[in-house]
Structure formats: C-alpha cells, structure tokens
Amino acid sequence: MPFASVEQIVNYAEQNKGILVAINAEKVLHATDDLRSLTDNNIGYCDGSGVAIALHQKGYNEAIKIAGCDLWLELVERFQSTKSFYLVGGKQEVIEETVRKLQLQFPEIKILGYHHGYLKSKEEQSALINEVARLKPDVVFVAMGSPKQELLMRELQKRHPFAIYQGLGGSYDIYVGHVERAPKWWIDHNMEFAYRLIKQPSRIKRQISLLKYAWWLMTKKL
C-alpha cells in the first residue's frame, strides 16, 4: 500500500510486522519474480521519487518518497525504549562504529547483537540465522545491498517471523560519515541520484538504465 507519511509506515510495520522493502526505479527495472513476490508479501514503500510519481499517475496522490536511510533511524527513535534490535551488514569496523554511535545517540537502545555483512559461506549464514532466531530481536536491520539483503531477510523471517525487518543498503556508511549523502537541496528537488553520480562517476553504467524508467514514466507505461 502507498504510504502518506513516515509515521504511517512505522505504525503499519509495528502492527503487521514483516520486511520493509525499499522500492526505487532500479528495483522496478531489475526485479525478478522472486523479489516481486517477496515485496508483494511484505511491506513495500517508495524509496525513490520515480516510484512516487508512477503511483501518482495511477491515482495514489497521497504516496510520498520515504528514504530508507531516514526511515531506519525513525524506527530506532520510536522504539529505542520499548523494543530490541539486531544489526547486520557493512564491514566489521563500520558495524562496530554504527553500534557505538547508536548507543550514544539513543541511550535507551537495546542492541542484542550485530554481525558484519560479508557472509562467505552457507555455514556462516546459518550461524547468523540461528543467532537471530535464538535472540528474537523485535527489529532487524540488514545493510547488504539488494537483492542480497532481501533474500537474507526472507530466510531470517522464516525462523523468526515476529520482527520488523528493514534492508538498508549503504545506510550504515552514511550514518557514520564514511559516505556523504546529497545536500538537502538535491534531495528536495529529487536530484539525489545526480549528486551521487557526480561523486561516483563509476555509477554511470547502473544509472544509464534509468533512462528507460524515465521513458516509461513519460509514456505512462508503468
């Protein structure tokens, strides 16, 4: 369902549990049947302005863009004193730095555990899933990039279905300052993708496919 505010999606996730799946133009372009099914059976939200525009074209005028790198911190702020957390993703030093900063910023937060995002074997992944199932956190964040994070969250959910899950991509790196987020003007004018391209020209191969999405928007084929 399209969400009209951050508060609405947080309330919905608390009542319904499930995997919060960020939907942007890249995911729409490259989604497999498997990922579509995962999204349809969980909680998809507009993480990109292009998706919000497509929903507006279909009559969902209340739909807004909700950036995943903001949403996870809203969940932490809302539930820091009432729910427990588990974090997955990033390099070891990044996840450790993220945990330290969260504990400073949100003194009441209860972090039951954390694990880096470089799972090199099925055994390592199974051990992580077993730990999450044993600890039973209320909220699980997984920052590994798509579709890896969604597929891992689905496996975690099978063993521990009573949690809110959210995929975060590179949000830990942004949170601790290893990666610079676009300034507010670029975000407000739906130009965050252009700022990231300026900062990381190597992204051109990924972003050139967005021209196809733009054409679909203009011709209302979405």
Image: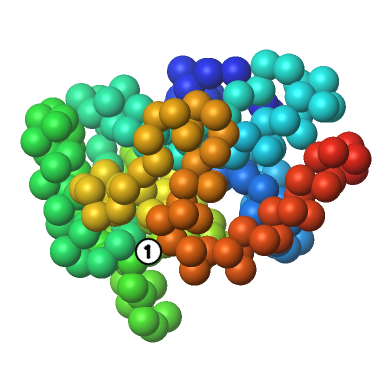
Q: Quadrant of the C terminus?
A: top right
Residue 130 vertical placement versus 108 (above, below): below
**Residue 46 visible here:** no
* Residue 77 as seen in the image, left or right of residue 154: left
**Residue 72 visible here:** yes
Mark 1 surroundings: few (<14), some (14-19) or many (≥20) residues within 10 A: some
Residue 97 vertical placement versus 151 (above, below): above
Count of marks, rendered view: 1
Q: Secondary structure at mark 1?
A: helix
Q: Quadrant of the N terminus?
A: top right
Residue on which disc 1 sits = 129
Foreground residue among 84 and 44:
44
Q: x and y percent of residue 203 in the render?
A: 52, 64
Residue 164 vertical placement versus 79 (above, below): below
Q: Residue at x 15, y 53 (%)?
A: 97
Q: Residue at x 69, y 54 (%)?
A: 210
* Residue 95 as seen in the image, left or right of residue 17: left
Colour pattern: rainbow
Residue 20 vertical placement versus 154 (above, below): above
* Residue 134 as seen in the image, left or right of residue 69: left
Q: x and y percent of residue 205 in the render?
A: 61, 68
Q: Residue at x 54, y 38 (%)?
A: 191
Name, please, the residue furthest toward the front: 198
Q: Amino acid at mark 1?
A: Ile
Foreground residue among 110 and 20:
20
Q: x and y percent of residue 221 in the render?
A: 90, 43
Foreground residue among 222 and 179:
179
Foreground residue among 146 and 49:
49
Q: x and y percent of residue 104 in the render?
A: 9, 36
Q: Residue at x 67, y 48 (%)?
A: 25
* Residue 190 as seen in the image, left or right of residue 196: right
